[in-house]
Image: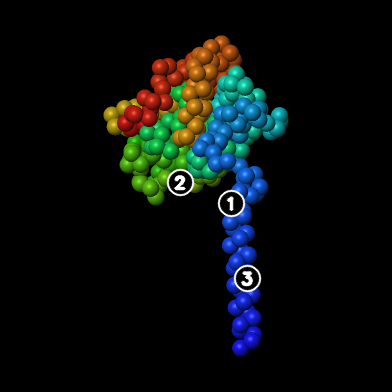
Amino acid sequence: MTRILNTTKWAVLALSFGLMAACSDSGSDDEATKPAASNDPPPAAQSTLAAAKAAGKIRIGYANEAPYAYMDSEKNQITGEAVEIARVVLKRMGINEVEGVLTEFGSLIPGLQAKRFDIIAAGMYVTPERCQQVAFSNPTYGVGQSFLVQKGNPKNLHSYEDVAKQDDARLGVVVGAIESEYASKMDIPVDRVVVFPDVVSALSGVQAGRADAYAATAMTVNDLMKKTATGDLEKADPFTDPVVDGKSVRGYGAFGFRKDDQEFVDAFNAELAKFIGTEEHAKIVAPFGFTKDELPGDVTAAKLCAANGQ
């Protein structure tokens, strides 16, 4: 009983002291030293463009496909039409260094979205489907299609229609490339479309007979022919571009940015417009096989994103 009473007494005393302390703390130094509440919004995250300018460098994703973007083993650096244009334009924007991130073509858009790099510099065609996922710059080139085939073109393949008509003809494409879409729209069965991870694998696939033709841009096939000395392959000549939704396709390549980097795209386009078609531009892209015939003219990303069938 005594233990219970003593416990109660101490509890009452503790409560009393607590109440006194609470009353005396109403104007305490601790309260006075607390920072005043601020109605200012939290600082905004730095944009990709601002971060790149501050760092003086940026990462670009590429798929090792000449002549657009590839590793030059002799110089141990990435180069190509897209890479060299990017270097010039970005330098004019105050970004002096370009760091390449090698990625399979089909993983370029996911890699961009995951922020593994900040620009796709791979000669990627602008299509309405891709425009749903990527903000494109205006194009730097326009080009048609071609086939790489075995010497003598055994199955006489000069168009997508030729492949579709022959039940045993197999068409090679690179994963994620526009050629898969062309094959589908030209009614080539899926089981006769052989998907390769990259250009080198596609070339080897045609050599080994796993595919009867490799479909790519005319620029890609031209470059492969220059670098292939075995003599067992050739470019299908003549070649007829596929007609999709009533239009003969001509692909337009551009740089890809994240959708929330429109400020970056606008700044990039402003410098790009001053560069494309100049003597400096012609000199830079000539080593990669580009001429005035590949200039994009007045075609813009907005037109391509709104177009049907490309």
Which one is closest to the eye, mark 2 or mark 1? 1
Q: Tell me which corner region of the image, top left, top right, bottom left or bottom right, holds residue 76.
A: top right
Indicate the amino acid at tag 2.
Answer: Val
* Residue at mark 1 to residue at mark 3: CA–CA distance: 21 Å
Return the disc, 1 or 3, that comes first in the chain's sequence: 3
In the rendered image, which residue does mark 2 sit on?
A: 194
What residue appears at the point 37 percent right and 33 percent down from the top-left corner?
128
Indicate the amino acid at tag 3.
Answer: Leu
| Relative depth, front residue between 111 and 38 | 38
Q: Are marks 2 and 1 in contact (CB under 8 Å)?
A: no
Left or right: where does residue 128 sit relative to residue 92?
A: left
Under circle 2, the secondary element is strand
Looking at the rendered structure, which numbered label has been put on residue 129? Answer: none
What residue appears at the point 40 percent right and 20 percent down from the top-left corner?
299
Return the disc, 2 or 3, that comes first in the chain's sequence: 3
Task: State the residue lying farthest toward the left.
Answer: 246
In the rendered image, which residue does mark 1 sit on?
A: 26
What residue appears at the point 64 percent right and 81 percent down from the top-left corner?
6
* Residue at mark 2 to residue at mark 1: CA–CA distance: 78 Å
Return the disc, 2 or 1, that comes first in the chain's sequence: 1
Under circle 1, the secondary element is helix
The image shows residue 256, relative to residue 18, as above or below, that is: above
What residue appears at the point 33 percent right and 32 percent down from the top-left corner?
309
Indicate the amino acid at tag 1.
Answer: Ser
* Residue at mark 2 to residue at mark 3: CA–CA distance: 86 Å
Q: Tell me which corner region of the image, top left, top right, bottom left or bottom right, holds residue 250.
A: top left
Figure coloring:
rainbow
Looking at the rendered structure, which numbered label has been put on residue 13? Answer: 3
Under circle 3, the secondary element is helix
Work out which quarter of the rendered image holds the N terminus and state it.
Answer: bottom right
